[in-house]
Amino acid sequence: MRVISLLPFVGAAIALPTETPGAAPSNATAPDVNAIKSVPQDHFKSYQTGGLVRQSLKAEGTKSKRDWTCSTSPTLTWGDSDNGGKGIFITNTDNDWRGFYAFHNNCDTIPYKYIWVAAGATQFVSFPDGWEGRIQRGVDATMLNGQAHWLGTWFEFSWDANGWGWSDVSLIRGCDGPVLVNSQDGSGAWKGFTQDILSNAPANALDTKDDGQRVLAATEFIGGAINTPPRDWELQQVGSQYVYVDDSHGSPVIAATNGRFGTTWPAGRA
């Protein structure tokens, strides 16, 4: 196993995992964000839900995890080998290393897998059959402390029995920064956004993450009531055709017939 020195990153604004990493696979090709976003929304099929299996938070604990057993210890990867199978490409377009944490539906306290991606790099993350869940940005001190941390942007994704992937970007549980998702099946389908909608957000639309960062609040309370200030801000700044702002607007879900998605993560508030 090749040891990667972490000395160049001492003093960085974030803290990399203390676990000694193995050699990360070579970076995948970075996406052309402008080309992705140039495809009009009416040139591909969008769905209100489609085959996506989402986590319901309207009543805690009411949705089963199917045959999935929640992880008792998270797996750190620095990038998985890409054999052409289903999975997610993660591109970090921020200016420093960033952490990304994958949680299975209703397994909110311990991630199944997490990865740190260097600034400007793209890495592939594989997932097993039966996966239904999300990826959130964050830092180890918070995301690995054994508690649920819902507040923030969710990239949701799952696969159906035919191997199709389904995904969306959801701001229902809050927004700590942009995410762009695009299908890798040649359809040109994409959702999400890349612009900063946090800096000028109204004060009554904000909430505080467990790590102290000020972000957009959840747009739905447990039980389904709407939190109007953040929901209306997100409708104005992004639009319901691109993200879930609540469970009642738009068709922000896309499919990938080959089970593969690319995601781009600009600067956020981890």
Image (cartoon, rainbow, N blue to C red):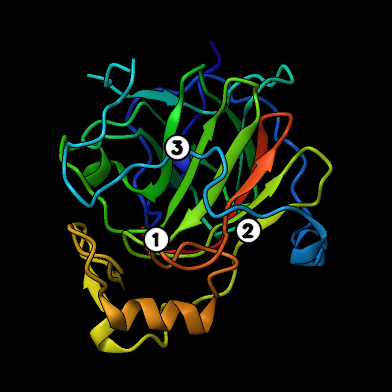
In the picture provided, is 182 more to the left or to the right than 103?
right
In the image, residue 221 above or below residue 12: below
Q: Rounded to the nearest whole Å, what is the CA distance between mark 2 and mark 3? A: 17 Å
SS class, disc 2:
strand
**Residue kind at label 1, given as amino acid type:** Asp
The residue lying toward the viewer, choosing from 23 and 41, is 41
Confirm or deny contact between disc 1 and disc 2 (CB under 8 A). Answer: no
In the image, residue 240 above or below residue 43: below
Residue at 24% in and 86% down: 204
The residue lying toward the viewer, choosing from 183 and 228, is 228
Q: In the image, which disc is placed on residue 44?
A: none
SS class, disc 3:
loop
Q: Position of residue 110 (x, y in %)?
A: 25, 31
Quarter of the image holding residue 144? top left
- Dot 1 or dot 2, earlier in sequence: 2
- Dot 1 or dot 3, earlier in sequence: 3
Residue at 40% in and 22% down: 20
Q: In the image, which disc is placed on residue 247?
A: 1
Residue indicated by mark 2: 191
Residue at 22% in and 46% down: 142
SS class, disc 1:
loop
**Residue kind at label 2, given as amino acid type:** Lys
Q: Position of residue 82 (x, y in %)?
A: 69, 21
Quarter of the image holding residue 146? top left
Near mark 2 (Cα within 10 A), the count class, few <14, some 14-19 or many ≥20, is: many
In the picture provided, is 59 more to the left or to the right than 3?
left
Q: In the image, which disc is placed on residue 53?
A: 3
- Dot 2 or dot 3, earlier in sequence: 3
Q: Position of residue 249 (x, y in %)?
A: 47, 68
Give the residue furthest to the top: 1
Q: Rounded to the nearest whole Å, what is the CA distance between mark 1 and mark 2? A: 16 Å
